[in-house]
Amino acid sequence: MAKDNVPFHSVIFPACLLGTEDGYTAVNHLSGIDYLNYEDAKFSKSRGIGVFGDHAQDTQIDSDIWRFYLLYVRPETQVNQPLNFFSSI
């Protein structure tokens, strides 16, 4: 998950789930990453930049290969550095 989505997925969405009192399982760990690039631009669903699930499925490439590739090209600049959540708000 890109760092710009961390505040929503770590605070707002879990608070909404807790408010329902439906017993949803809370996330224990959340991994924020740098932005993944595709053809010299940041992945962007809203701008249609990247390869998305429906496109990946159309290639007939096994999902495990896609998972491996995405982990392999993951744009980490630092290993095991906790995300400074409050500085990103």
Image: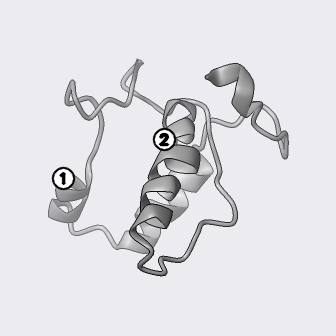
Does 30 sit left or right of 66 as displayed?
A: right
Q: Residues within 10 Å of mark 2 (few under 14, many from 20)?
A: few
Q: Residue furthest bottom?
A: 23
Does 51 sit left or right of 19 as displayed?
A: left
Q: Are marks 1 and 2 in contact (CB under 8 Å)?
A: no
Dot label at residue 55: 1
**Relative to 66, is 83 above or below?**
above
Q: Position of residue 19 (x, y in %)?
A: 45, 62
In the image, what residue type sits under mark 1? His
In the image, what residue type sits under mark 2? Phe
At mark 1, the secondary structure is: helix
Does 51 sit left or right of 63 as displayed?
A: left
Disc 2 marks which residue? 8
Q: Position of residue 48 (x, y in %)?
A: 20, 30
> Residue 51 appears in which quarter of the rendering?
top left
Number of numbered discs: 2
**Relative to 70, is 4 above or below?**
above
Q: Residue at x 51, y 30 (%)?
A: 4
Please state which of residues 22 and 47 is positioned toward the viewer in this rendering: 22
Q: Position of residue 44 (x, y in %)?
A: 32, 29
**Relative to 74, is 69 above or below?**
below
Please state which of residues 81 and 68 is positioned toward the viewer in this rendering: 81
Q: Residue at x 50, y 65 (%)?
A: 18
At mark 2, the secondary structure is: helix
Q: Residue at x 72, y 20 (%)?
A: 87
Q: Position of residue 8 (x, y in %)?
A: 48, 41
Distance from disc 1 to disc 2, alpha carbons, whole Å, reads 26 Å
